[in-house]
Image (spheres, rainbow, N blue to C red):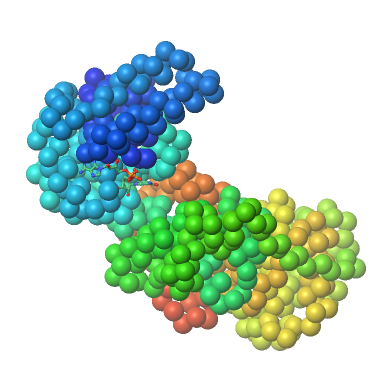
Amino acid sequence: MADAHALALDRAVVVIGAGTMGAGIAEVAAVAGHRVYLCDTSEAALDRGRAQIRASLDRRVAKGKASAEDAASAFARVIAAGPSAPLQGVGLVIEAIVENLDIKVAALTEMARRVDDDAILSTNTSSLSVTALAARLPAPERVAGLHFFNPATILPLVEVVRGHATDPALVETLVATARAWKKTPVMCQSTPGFIVNRVARPFYGEALRLLLEQQATPETVDAVMRECGGFRMGPCELMDLIGHDVNFAVTRSVWQAFFHDPRYQPSLVQQQLVDAGWLGRKSGRGFYDYRDDAPRPDVHDLQGPAPARVRIEGALGPAQGLVALLEQAGLNVEKTEGAGLLRVDGVALALTDGRSAGARSQALGEPVVLFDLALDYAASKRIALSVAEGTPADVIAQAAGLFTALGKQVSLLGDAAGLAVSRTVAMLVNEAADAVQQGIASEADIDAAMTGGVNYPIGPLAWGRRVGLDYVAAVLTHLSQGYGEDRYRVSPWLQARVREVSHG
Ligand code: NAI
């Protein structure tokens, strides 16, 4: 049933900008049944935009997602509109032109004169302040952000962005309209990076930290994040795909917009790549070499002897899933009281808690091999280990042997506090927690945004609850103490949730 709040189908939609995003958004609105006026200052861009829509609709027909008649009528609903064409019955304007505030203000001011007074004015901006844009238009309360993801015809997520003056009823209309267009809307306040581009920063930032400190190679970080963390792509290969110029610019703009908060600090590693012109796939080189189908460097896998005896000393917390795996593997397993360690033929192993292996070994009074957090210890194909400098090779081999006996591949990082997955997940949860604390978006919408917009295997807050928010807070506290940096400070929201659990 149609949602009464959604934009009525007899109201037309104007899309300003017939580029990659504008053409995609115009197609989505036309397929949903609206008449769409597609505008662009360039005739050639309008032709290209219409050709993009035609080709995309043809693909829908070929895949059986639309009938030839429906595709033809959707295409007929897209009207290329010149600068003086009459625009009738317009209920919604979506601006998708160059990412420049002055140019966007000028285009929307001009469009506001051409459409009905009650038309909603929206912007597809990824990085500009919706509040600042709205303030420069005649009726700021009728302005909001409507942020689609590329390709707009395929990715379901739409961030509906509320500027400081935006009328709440208008947000409701946009959410209902996005749903009627078969999209997944999430609501957020106008804030740097909105939800996705803000909460995702640590995914890149922590990987860049590991590379800066020479704790791992890009291929090892990627393999661990994919095969242990369960992410669809590793951070290095993803940055290569996005383009280092684009990724670096987004990080810089979020960092600047947050008044240089160290959480978002850009990395010298990425600055070097940008300076070198190694922008990733599009320039043939980034972290990896894409010229002439050059093969990816191999990931070095550790091997070790099968363990004769395994002792589980106490509860393993978020790594408790390993217990069943060890038992199923037919190993000689003994359980005792203890501080949450695995002992393999005398060698101590522990899940990282954000301290380095050096610090942890010192606290324990014996060398300890740390292992990383996995999304799912049963399903993961890889595990990462880290050891203190000077740890004997046979100790490392013994630890590796435990995981090879469970059918996992094993990567050795340097003595990286929080290894790769654990520190990244902790920082993603922390970022999401701060966004909730600051009223940027709801828990549910943040999780929906990160799974729907960037394909995370599970929303960060659901992930935090799964491993235990106390574990996340402990990892962050240890990182903060180890680095002595404000970057790893624990969100007040997270601290409050941890207190609730310990008191409840
Ligand atoms: P694009 O460069 O492909 O297209 C922009 C179009 O706007 C061009 O056809 C240009 O001729 C036209 N244009 C420029 N000034 C105009 C004006 N004053 N009036 C009418 N048309 C004008 O750009 P793209 O990638 O489609 O991005 C558009 C907007 O969407 C930007 O704000 C961008 O930040 C945002 N965005 C882009 C995403 C992406 O992955 N490309 C993802 C999400 C948002």
Is the residue 230 above or below the residue 78 in the image? below
The quarter holding residue 468 reads bottom right
Asked if residue 378 shows in the view, the reply is yes
Is the residue 286 above or below the residue 450 in the image? below
**Which of 20 and 475 lies nearest the eye of the viewer?**
20
Q: Residue at x 41, y 52 (%)?
A: 196
- Residue 404 pos. (x, y %): 81, 61
Is the residue 35 above or below the residue 298 in the image? above
Single out the residue that lies furthest toward the top.
Answer: 69
Asked if residue 499 shows in the view, the reply is no
Residue 300 located left or right of residue 28: right
Quarter of the N terminus within the rendering: top left
- Residue 236 pos. (x, y %): 55, 61
Q: Residue at x 34, y 62 (%)?
A: 254
What is the total number of numbered labels drawn onto the structure image?
0
The quarter holding residue 215 reads bottom right
- Residue 152 pos. (x, y %): 40, 37
Q: Residue at x 62, y 54 (%)?
A: 292
Residue 384 located left or right of residue 488: right
**Which of 431 and 238 lies nearest the eye of the viewer?**
238
- Residue 457 pos. (x, y %): 56, 48
Indicate the quadrant of ligand 1 in the picture.
top left
Is the residue 92 above or below the residue 389 in the image? above
Q: Residue at x 59, y 61 (%)?
A: 288
The quarter holding residue 308 reads bottom right
Residue 313 located left or right of residue 273: right
